[in-house]
Amino acid sequence: MELWFSEYHSPDIKISIRVRKQLFSQYSDYQHIQVFDTYEFGRMLVMDNVIMMSEKDEFIYHEMIVHVPMAVHPHARRALIIGGGDGGALRELCRYDDLEEIVMVEIDRLAVEVSKKYLPTVAASFDDPRVTLLFEDGLRYVRRCRDMFDVIIVDSTDPFGPGESLFTKEFYGNCSHALRDGGILVNQHEGPFFHNESTEAAATFKKTSQIFRHVMVYQAHIPVYPAGHWLFGFMSDSYHPLNDFNPERWLARGIRTNYYNTSLHRGAFALPTYVLRLLHEGVLLDRVYKRVVEGGIWPPDDQLAGAQAHDMDEIDFSEIERYGEDDA
């Protein structure tokens, strides 16, 4: 008998991955945590039936969420990770010798314990002496912080369950206060293709654009995530991710990567037009693309505005500059 794990990306599409064996399954105080050994992706961490990472492609996500901000900031000394219980973002941060302290705030102790046991190549840096690991809610933690960190990485789950509070305007406002002058905040920004993720991506861009001077979104191809297309947000009041990027300085560190490189750094911010429209105008792809329905073309041109506004009626995009133009 074959064993398959299926994840729904929308009510009409799911991805199924053949499983060799289920290694772990338990409910923590916050979520259902599972680990599968799969044929194609190796070991795979799943929370509340949503794939968090796999051994085969986790390097893409973790390199892009860490090396982009670290390659821009010229002298980061203190870093904060919120979430990231699998340890992948921590592993990448620990490759920077000039970081003096790394604080990691993860709400779910079991997520860390499971990752240490079943994902040792990912959860490889928890014993680094520079690391302080705290088990508490990330929103509550940053409420108490003022001018403490040079880089904050929000490696959250999706915006439901334990990760829900990490997508609020209050949370991002508190993060801005927790950053030192010249600080950089990076988050996982959801995906642009399917309805649920794209709605959240547009909403998050709107919230953060009201708080930080420089807000730009960049992308990566992560096969195990919905549509294989994932976004990250870069936020700072001081540093622009392209204008203040010094590739020679980063290359001098001698860090070996499998996905990130200095050419890709620049290219990752060149977003497709449909993603720009999503972020800056709130245009959802599944509300405007043309298709044949019962012999006719849907949606008609005169219904486009109303259709796209239906899902985004609570988001005001009037204050957002078009297509990522900035005052740098």
Image: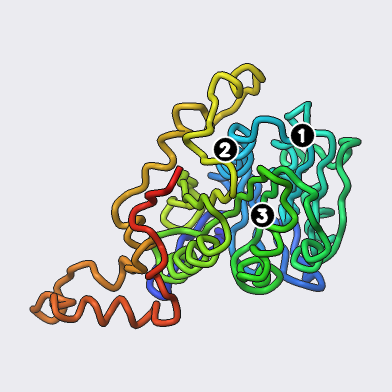
Judged from this view, the residue extending furthest toward the left is 295
Coordinates of residue 58 in the picture (x, y in percent): 60, 43
Side (left or right) of 79 relative to 268: right
| Residue 126: quarter of image | top right
Q: Secondary structure at mark 3?
A: strand
Task: Establish if 307 lies above or below 37.
Answer: below
| Residue 139: quarter of image | bottom right
Q: Which mark is residue 154?
A: 3
Q: Which mark is residue 168?
A: none
Q: Earlier in the sequence, mark 1 or mark 3?
A: 1
Q: Secondary structure at mark 2?
A: helix
Rounded to the nearest angstrom, the CA distance separating label 1 from label 2 is 15 Å
Side (left or right) of 143 relative to 260: right
Mark 1 neighbour density, 10 Å: few (under 14) some (14–19) many (20 or more): many
**Figure colour scheme:** rainbow
The answer to whether residue 46 of the structure is visible from this angle is yes
Name the residue that disc number 2 marks. 68
Q: Which mark is residue 94?
A: 1
Residue at figure coordinates x 71%, y 70% from the top left: 162
Judged from this view, the residue extending furthest toward the right is 129
The answer to whether residue 57 of the structure is visible from this angle is no
Q: Nearer the viewer, residue 328 or 111?
A: 328
Residue at figure coordinates x 48%, y 34% from the top left: 243
